[in-house]
Image (cartoon, rainbow, N blue to C red):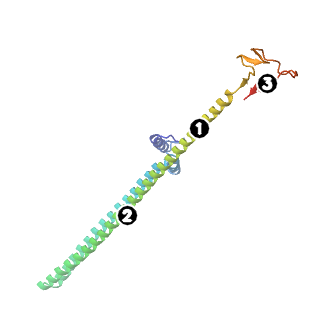
């Protein structure tokens, strides 16, 4: 269904998502979601799928951290506004009740104490949120790195095993073929061998120096010796 080229597979996904049906409607919804699932199931190799999953996890973490930062900033702004409003109200009420310098000093001291306390609490909240975000990011990065390393190690092991199996099979096939060829040559090269009981060199036959023709070995004559070898020997 898919080619080995990643660009081709990504182009296929984009074309599938942009393709119109008979009514000119772009496949948004279940059709597009099915196309994306088919692409993730059949269009990606295991290592590519691991990298895509890592990218998705990183994007989710970034979105979560950004949302947390926005919430913290909004909370800080709201708290600062509330603190300032409370200080203004307190100052107005106390100044309206008394114009004594001592009372004004107490008002200022109380406002500073309240503001410093709230700011300290906000600072602690920001530190805690930032530390939690850093921990989450570090954990996600470690998980992604571990997933990628495991995927690479598994891919390397699979490749090595396949190569070793292929080499062993090729060596066994070559050895078997060579053995069959040697056996065929040895067995096929052996044929009928003529054994001459009477060589052409001068020999003594019945006490005479001669080179006679071989007698009829099949004769029943008692005066003729039989050949100690078979005339035709099948080796």
Element class at badge 3: loop
Q: Which comes before the other along the chain, label 3 or label 1?
A: 1
Counting from the top left corner in percent of width and height, residue 185 is at: 64, 29
Element class at badge 1: helix
| Residue 88, image quadrant | bottom left
Q: Which residue is mark 2?
A: 136
Query: Looking at the image, which residue is at 28% across and 72% down?
Result: 124
Q: Which residue is mark 3?
A: 227
Distance from the alpha carbon under mark 2 to that under mark 3:
102 Å
Counting from the top left corner in percent of width and height, residue 177 is at: 61, 35
Query: Looking at the image, which residue is at 41% across and 59% down?
Result: 143
Picture quarter with the N terminus = top right
The answer to whether the residues at label 2 and label 3 have Cβ atoms under 8 Å apart is no
Q: Which comes before the other along the chain, label 2 or label 1?
A: 2
Q: Using the rendered image of the protein, determine whether residue 139 is visible from the camera's viewpoint.
A: yes
Q: Which residue is mark 1?
A: 175
Query: Looking at the image, which residue is at 65% across and 30% down?
Result: 186
Counting from the top left corner in percent of width and height, residue 197 is at: 75, 22
Picture quarter with the C terminus = top right
**Which one is nearer the viewer's eye here, 113 or 106?**
113
Instruction: Bin the neighbour count of mark 2 within 10 Å (Cα to Cα): few under 14, some 14-19, many 20 and up.
Output: some
């Amino acid at each position: 269904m898919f080619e080995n080229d990643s660009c081709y597979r990504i182009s296929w996904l984009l074309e599938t998502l942009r393709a119109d049906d008979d009514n000119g409607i772009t496949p948004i919804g279940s059709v597009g979601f099915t196309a994306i699932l088919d692409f993730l199931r059949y269009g990606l190799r295991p290592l590519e799928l691991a990298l895509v999953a890592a990218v998705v996890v990183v994007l989710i973490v970034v979105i979560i951290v950004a949302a947390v930062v926005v919430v913290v900033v909004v909370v800080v702004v709201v708290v600062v506004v509330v603190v300032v409003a409370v200080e203004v109200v307190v100052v107005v009420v106390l100044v309206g009740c008394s114009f004594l310098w001592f009372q004004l000093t107490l008002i200022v001291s109380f406002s500073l104490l309240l503001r410093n306390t709230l700011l300290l609490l906000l600072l602690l909240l920001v530190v805690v949120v930032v530390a939690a975000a850093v921990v989450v990011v570090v954990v996600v990065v470690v998980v992604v790195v571990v997933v990628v390393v495991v995927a690479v190690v598994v891919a390397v092991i699979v490749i090595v095993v396949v190569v070793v199996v292929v080499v062993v099979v090729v060596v066994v096939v070559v050895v078997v073929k060579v053995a069959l060829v040697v056996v065929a040559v040895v067995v096929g090269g052996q044929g009928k061998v003529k054994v001459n009981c009477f060589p052409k060199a001068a020999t003594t036959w019945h006490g005479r120096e001669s080179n006679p023709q071989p007698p009829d070995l099949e004769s029943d004559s008692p005066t003729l010796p039989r050949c100690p070898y078979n005339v035709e020997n099948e080796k």
